[in-house]
Image (spheres, helix red, strand yellow):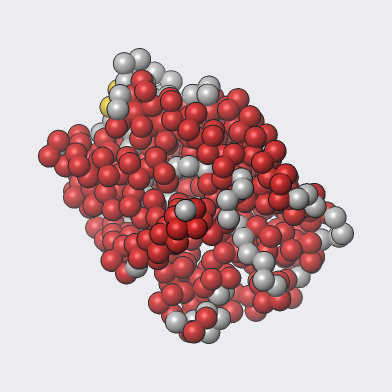
């Protein structure tokens, strides 16, 4: 029965991630770039200032300050998708897939600006006065109740897409590989991860935000230092790796069958999995920011894909490509990244570094993703019932630890695809309202009246 389910999920993932969806994601992002006249990109420095706390207002509505909101969103995105997902993209699509991840990230920054600005514009409140947000509230409050079926589709898919299947699976695989444990030990790891995650996620959004704001800077800096060390050791190979990425991006030579379309699709899929631009999860977190200025949070949200894909994913890709392990092994996912680290770093050090990084990245993702699921369940029922999703989430960590990586990838990819449709459609329809607010905000900023 499980094999039948695996086959169905695999077939559905391949079917749904075809050109119509890719055109919606990429085409939508290109539309946002052109429609905004690239204006948000000119205020990237201002976004950094907002992130630094210059414009924080503790009296503003919301649960998290700007830094906590971005940290929590990045905690959910800078995770296994950056360490394991990049390896999967290179194996499935060749080095050229990295180029299409970059393109998707740049386009995704514009998408994030619109979707996260809308998330603040159309927020709701629960019975305790806590703000709730996300594409489902954007749809029902921004487009009207007649569009609610589209919101329900997003929330239902969100219950699956925010499960920790991929993250728990790859963290477990890392521990098994490094510590030379048996597959039977995966159950014990799953129970341990579930216990650790429950300590944070049962504390609610504020505890998640506090933990994420401390973990994220540490994990990004540590990973940056580690991979830069690997690249310095192999500095003579780095220029050739960039050349390979660019040349393969349009030839598809490294892909089975040399099909360029497959390469593009794989790059876009993995970028969507990595930075989630257009998927609709980040707006749920950014919508809780303490601010009265939707455009301000939209600018902060743009920083996410830059850190996530342009920086962290690129570092991982260069580490894998420069060592050449992607051509000499049948490993995939985290096992491939682990082998790349061990090829260059002194014996045993690669294992230690990867296990620390994977643990921090994965746990930060496990903590943040639960909030997305509770928000979706709260929308489908009542906000006060959303917290019960946490128990499903904790149980799923144990199950995810032992399933096959292919099933985990296909399951999340399928749900993400369904979530993207309502998210992008609603953002496209409401884009004029964002532009109107943006024009006012940027004029006030130029006049120094804010």
In the displayed image of the protein, which residue is found farthest to the right?
347
- Residue 268: x and y in percent read 43, 64
Relative image position of residue 75 (x, y in whole percent):
54, 41
Q: Is residue 445 above or below residue 415?
A: above
Q: Quadrant of residue 12?
A: bottom left
Q: In front here: 36 or 286?
A: 286
Is 341 left, or right, of 193 in this rendering? right
Answer yes or no: is residue 112 visible. Answer: yes
Image: 223 above or below 449: below
Residue plotted at (57% across, 64% down) = 88
- Indicate the quadrant where residue 160 lies: top left
Report x, y in % for residue 340: 72, 65
Residue found at the very far left of the displayed protein: 146
Q: At 52% across and 81% down in the image, what residue appears?
A: 256
Residue toward you, 441 or 192: 192
Residue 306 in sight in this render: no
Please indicate whether residue 438 sits to the left or right of residue 259 in the image: left
Residue found farthest to the front: 1
- The structure residue drawn at horizontal position 48% and vertical position 33%, both measured from the top left corner, is 392
| Above or below, 313 relative to 214 | below
For the point 28% across and 61% down, the residue is 24
């Amino acid at each position: 029965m499980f094999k039948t389910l695996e086959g169905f999920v695999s077939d559905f993932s391949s079917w749904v991630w075809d050109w119509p969806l890719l055109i919606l994601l990429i085409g939508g992002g290109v539309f946002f770039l052109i429609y905004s006249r690239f204006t948000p990109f000119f205020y990237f420095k201002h976004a950094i200032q907002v992130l630094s706390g210059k414009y924080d207002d503790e009296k503003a509505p919301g649960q998290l300050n700007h830094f906590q909101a971005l940290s929590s969103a990045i905690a959910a995105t800078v995770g296994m998708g950056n360490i394991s997902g990049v390896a999967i993209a290179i194996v499935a699509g060749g080095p050229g897939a990295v180029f299409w991840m970059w393109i998707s990230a740049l386009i995704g920054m514009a998408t994030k600006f619109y979707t996260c600005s809308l998330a603040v514009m159309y927020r709701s409140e629960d019975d305790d006065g806590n703000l709730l947000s996300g594409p489902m509230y954007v749809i029902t409050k921004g487009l009207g109740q007649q569009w609610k079926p589209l919101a329900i589709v997003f929330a239902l898919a969100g219950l699956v897409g925010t499960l920790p299947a991929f993250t728990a699976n790859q963290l477990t695989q890392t521990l098994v590989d490094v510590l030379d444990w048996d597959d039977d030990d995966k159950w014990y790891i799953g129970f341990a991860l579930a216990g650790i995650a429950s300590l944070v996620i049962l504390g609610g959004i504020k505890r998640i935000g506090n933990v994420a704001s401390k973990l994220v800077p540490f994990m990004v800096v540590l990973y940056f230092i580690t991979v830069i060390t690997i690249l310095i050791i192999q500095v003579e190979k780095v220029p050739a790796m960039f050349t390979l990425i660019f040349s393969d991006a349009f030839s598809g030579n490294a892909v089975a069958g040399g099909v360029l379309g497959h390469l593009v699709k794989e790059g876009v899929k993995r970028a969507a999995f990595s930075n989630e631009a257009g998927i609709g999860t980040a707006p749920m977190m950014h919508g809780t920011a303490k601010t009265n200025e939707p455009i301000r949070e939209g600018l902060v949200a743009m920083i996410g894909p830059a850190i996530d894909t342009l920086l962290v994913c690129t570092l991982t890709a260069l580490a894998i490509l420069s060592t050449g392990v992607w051509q000499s092994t049948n490993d995939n996912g985290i096992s491939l990244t682990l082998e790349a680290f061990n090829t260059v770093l002194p014996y045993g050090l690669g294992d230690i570094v990867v296990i620390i990084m994977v643990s921090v990245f994965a746990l930060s993702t496990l903590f943040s993703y639960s909030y997305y699921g509770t928000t979706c369940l709260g929308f489908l029922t009542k906000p006060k019932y959303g917290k019960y999703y946490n128990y499903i989430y904790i149980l799923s960590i144990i199950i995810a630890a032992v399933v096959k990586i292919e099933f985990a990838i296909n399951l999340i990819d399928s749900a993400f695809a369904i979530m993207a449709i309502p998210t992008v459609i609603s953002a496209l329809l409401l884009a004029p309202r964002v532009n109107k607010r943006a024009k006012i905000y940027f004029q006030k900023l130029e006049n120094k009246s804010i």
